[in-house]
Amino acid sequence: MYCKKCKMGCFKEHFVHKFRAMLGKNRIIFPGEKVLLAVSGGSSSCAMLNQVQEGLGQNAHKKLRFKPGIVYIDEGCLLGQSTEKRQKTMAQINSLFKMTGFPHHIIPLEMVLNLPPSVLEPVHLATDDPAGSYKEAVDHFMQSSPVHSVDPRVDRSELSALTDATNPQLIAEAQTQTLQELFSRVKTLTAKEDLLHTLRRHLLVSTARTEGYSKLMLGENCTRLAVKLLANIALGRGAQLSVDTAFCDPRYGDIVAVKPMRDYTAKEISLYNYMWNVPYVFIPSLETKTADKSSIQRLTESFVVKLQVDFPSTVSTIYRQVWGNGSGMRSLTVFG
């Protein structure tokens, strides 16, 4: 697990380089642009957050130039957690986010009931936007920023104001009951997971739009995307494979979702977090402590993870079926 020559140094260098290269070669995020990081508290999204912190550091090589913010969606209402339990979890998340100095938003899932029914709103592009291309955006950023750096930190009073508005005590009990009743009418865990994913993404995109972010950064890794790929085929969504696993997802109009962790396996991320003490918070989900056959998503995950143990190239092979063939549609023939 350790390099015989440098012990751990080359692994970190490779890990960091892969993240920077993913952002650099795609050139989707422009200098000075506001980017919202969706952090669930898990190992993958927290590793992503750590990479952004490292990239914005004073001593960083090829320093990142965008302005990050963080969002966390509290799903405790679906697990039957008490207000005290949810507050405890939020306190852990809040302390984790405060260490970064980035503006952050902690939002209960119940807030999705107050949002419009669709996130696919028309895009209104400003005609005077100087960032017509990546090179023009870099030139504009360098000219408008005398110190040639981005300081994403905000005043502590602003941070507390962001979290106070989403305190569980301020969420109406009727909203919690409405959301719980909605999920109680969904009979299978497969459908519940699907519904939760839709509501979560709806809330993330709406938060990004409301708070003035133009990009949404997700922490989905290669292992998770491989599971998602097979599960979506089983659910009849084969036509969406290429977009679901691509670095850039433009389906939400003015908010573009990006996946900079898509080339990392879950094992790589776990090793990185362990070696460099990257903090993360374990938060249970709908699938926690459920049987392998409880849902299509859970069964697919179990199948892929167990196969990966004996055949380490399983995840990369599944993942390449979309991109190796050049089309998500062509990959359908591989799996039958």
Image (tube, helix red, strand yellow):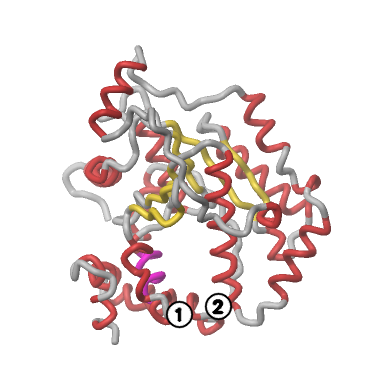
Callout 2 crowding tier (Cα within 10 Å): few <14, some 14–19, many ≥20: some
**Could you tell whether 204 is left or right of 333 in the image?**
right
Callout 1 crowding tier (Cα within 10 Å): few <14, some 14–19, many ≥20: some
Name the residue beneath numbered marker 1.
235
Q: Residue furthest bottom?
A: 336
Q: From the top left corner, tell me how far across and down residue 173 is, in percent.
A: 83, 56
Quadrant including the N terminus: bottom left
**Residue 226 drawn in magenta:** yes
Q: From the top left corner, tell me how far across and down residue 46 is, in percent.
A: 46, 47
Specify the amino acid type for callout 1. Answer: Leu
- Lower sequence index among marks 1 and 2: 2
Q: Residue furthest left?
A: 5
Tell me the residue at 35%/22% (across/down). Answer: 58
Front residue of 313 and 322: 322
Front residue of 176 and 39: 176
Does residue 81 show up? yes
Name the residue beneath numbered marker 2.
190
